[in-house]
Amino acid sequence: MLGLVPSSSSSHLLCRSLAAARTLSVAAAGSSSSSSSVKMARSALDEVTDTGAFDRTPSTFRSFVSRDASARFPAVAGRYHLYVSYACPWASRCLAYLKLKGLDHAISFSSVKPIFERTRESDDHLGWVFPATADEVPGAGPDPFNGAKSVRDLYEIASTNYTGKPTVLWDKQLKTVVNNESSEIIRMLNAEFNDIAENPGLDLNPAHLQASIDEVNGLVYDAINNGVYKCGFAKKQGPYDEAVTTLYEALDKCEEILGKQRYMCGNQLTEADVRLFVTLIRFDEVYAVHFKCNKKLLREYPNLFNYTKDIYQTPGISSTVNMEHIRKHYYGSHPSINPYGIIPQGPNVDYNAPHDRERLFL
């Protein structure tokens, strides 16, 4: 066990819309009255408090897919589609599960464009948008089922409560959002689809490691996954300093743990590793510069750096990392942080380079 108190937050949230903008009030879909409106948070900056601190709000669609054939959302092949952004770390962990469990033949997926665009001509909202054609943006594709122009359209098909989160588990039969909370989606993918998974024996959340996984998740979510955003979107020095201190204390703790074992919960790949990896893979390319997390680079942590290469080289994982989308989104969608949208050339780290994890922990 880590000897750390897990975060009190039980909600592991999906990627919020990450550009700098105000929260808009727009007429709800299908309403003819301007008095009927919904809040649309375009930006993670919309979740910055009056004290200058960053505080995420919860996901809204929380239904579950079940292996029970009589359930409203049964785990059957061909029924569900995963809408994602390659740029989003929370979406990427869902893609990682799709690949690790061997479910990409049974659950289709598509990605939005990496940089925000207008979602309506009738208002100023900017958000996640699908390309018009398959070859417009490499890695992204048009909505194959609903003809949606944006993620906003999908939410308005299902509900007027638009939230801006790009990761959507969609039921093609009922034409609705099943869930947009990645921590819940990955647990469904891990356990509920085993009858149609190519790797049903892979359990990323085994019962005997549950307590350890939950403890690591508590540390990693608040201090690292969310911690980089607390650093990047802080509007005052105090909250930034506090977030940076907490972030690097957590990274130091992870470095210590990984000096003793191959993975965060022992010598077995688990959910905790996937959740940590999606932040680490973005660290030197984006967070160190864009979010001012430059006290120490990932490459200066021998264990964490080799661990990141180890997971990246796990079959299926590298295909979930689209660094071009990642860099374009962060540097191109936050005008208050990077007003000219200039994308740094970056270190272009080779995560396919050899690592020492197998040698150290046979």
Image (spheres, helix red, strand yellow):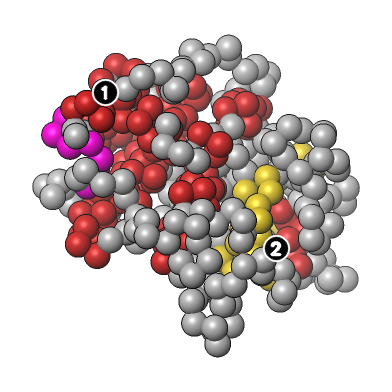
Hey, which quadrant is residue 211 in on the image? bottom left
Q: Are marks 2 and 1 in contact (CB under 8 Å)?
A: no
Q: Which mark is residue 356?
A: 1
Q: Is residue 353 magenta?
A: no
> Is 30 located above or below residue 199 in the figure?
below
Q: How many marks?
A: 2
The label nearer to you, 2 versus 1, is 1
Viewed as shown, does residue 266 lie left or right of 69? left
Whole-percent x, y for residue 297 in the image:
35, 19
Disc 2 crowd rating (10 Å Cα; few below 14, some 14-19, many 20+) is many
Crowding near the residue tagged with mark 1, few <14, some 14–19, many ≥20 C-alpha atoms within 10 Å: some
Q: Which residues are magenta?
A: 259-265
Question: In terms of depth relative to the viewer, which is nearer, 30 or 65?
Answer: 65
Q: Residue 152, can we see it?
A: yes
Residue at position x 86%, y 43% from top?
132
| Residue 311, percent from left and from top | 38, 35
**Residue 336 relative to residue 256: left or right:** right
Of 289 and 271, nearer the camera is 271
- Residue picked out by circle 2: 155
Amino acid carrying label 1: it is Asp
* Residue positioned 70% across, 63% down in the render: 155
Q: Is residue 14 above or below residue 290?
A: below
Q: What x and y, as percent, mark residue 199?
A: 44, 56
